[in-house]
């Protein structure tokens, strides 16, 4: 999960870098400035469920005040899941109970304008001591 979140934050950083570079070169046209920042992507997120069927991951990165529109789902193992995602930028997402594999969950990942944003992902399932995989898509 950390790698997937870092991929998302790297996309934000690249979008900011591209926008600043275009502005410095004088190639950024004012009405198009918000369009220059638009990005999207997808990342796999492997996870490990412990002896209680739980997992927790945290990532702290600069998000520059961007809000990413995200869709997340579990691909394996076949189980009933619950996931909670919070950020110091203001995200508070709690899935319904008993989410099944391939069931899409949508949320907005909000980041802080100044300083790093800490994202915490806490998951649980009705299986234990196993590795799993999911996917996240994002756009901003």
Image (cartoon, grey):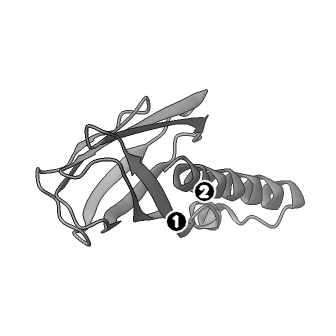
Instruction: Determine the residue located farthest toward the right in the rendered image.
Output: 25
Nearest the eye: 17 or 75: 75
Q: Which residue is found at the position 47% from the left and 59% from the top?
A: 45
Judge whether 14 appears above or below 137 on screen.
above
44 or 40, which lies in front? 44
Q: Position of residue 47 (x, y in %)?
A: 43, 52
- Left or right, 62 with respect to 96, comes to right
The x, y position of residue 65, in whole percent, is 52, 40
Count of picture labels: 2
Q: Are marks 1 and 2 in contact (CB under 8 Å)?
A: yes
Residue 40: percent from left, percent from top: 53, 68
Relative to 43, 95 lies left or right: left
Q: Where 38 sits versus 98, above or below?
A: below
- Do we see residue 140 in this rendering? no
Front position in the image: 131 or 118: 131
**Residue at 26% across, 43% down:** 53
**Alpha carbon distance from label 1 to label 2:** 7 Å
Up the image or down, 89 lies above or below 2; here it is above
Location of mark 2 (residue):
7
Which residue matches tag 1?
43
Question: Which quadrant holds residue 39?
Answer: bottom right
Say the numbered circle drawn on residue 61. none
The secondary structure type at the circle numbered 2 is helix
């Amino acid at each position: 999960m950390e790698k997937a979140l870092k991929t998302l934050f790297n996309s934000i950083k690249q979008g900011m870098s591209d926008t600043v570079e275009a502005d410095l070169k004088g190639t950024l046209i004012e009405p198009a400035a918000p369009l220059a920042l638009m990005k999207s992507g997808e990342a796999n997120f492997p996870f490990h469920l412990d002896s209680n069927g739980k997992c927790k991951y945290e990532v702290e990165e600069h998000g520059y005040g961007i809000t990413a529109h995200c869709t997340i789902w579990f691909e394996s193992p076949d189980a009933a899941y619950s996931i909670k995602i919070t950020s110091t930028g203001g995200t508070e997402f709690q899935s319904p109970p008993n989410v099944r594999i391939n069931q899409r969950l949508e949320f907005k990942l909000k980041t802080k304008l100044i300083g790093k944003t800490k994202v915490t992902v806490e998951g649980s399932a009705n299986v234990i001591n196993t590795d799993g995989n999911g996917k996240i898509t994002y756009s901003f």
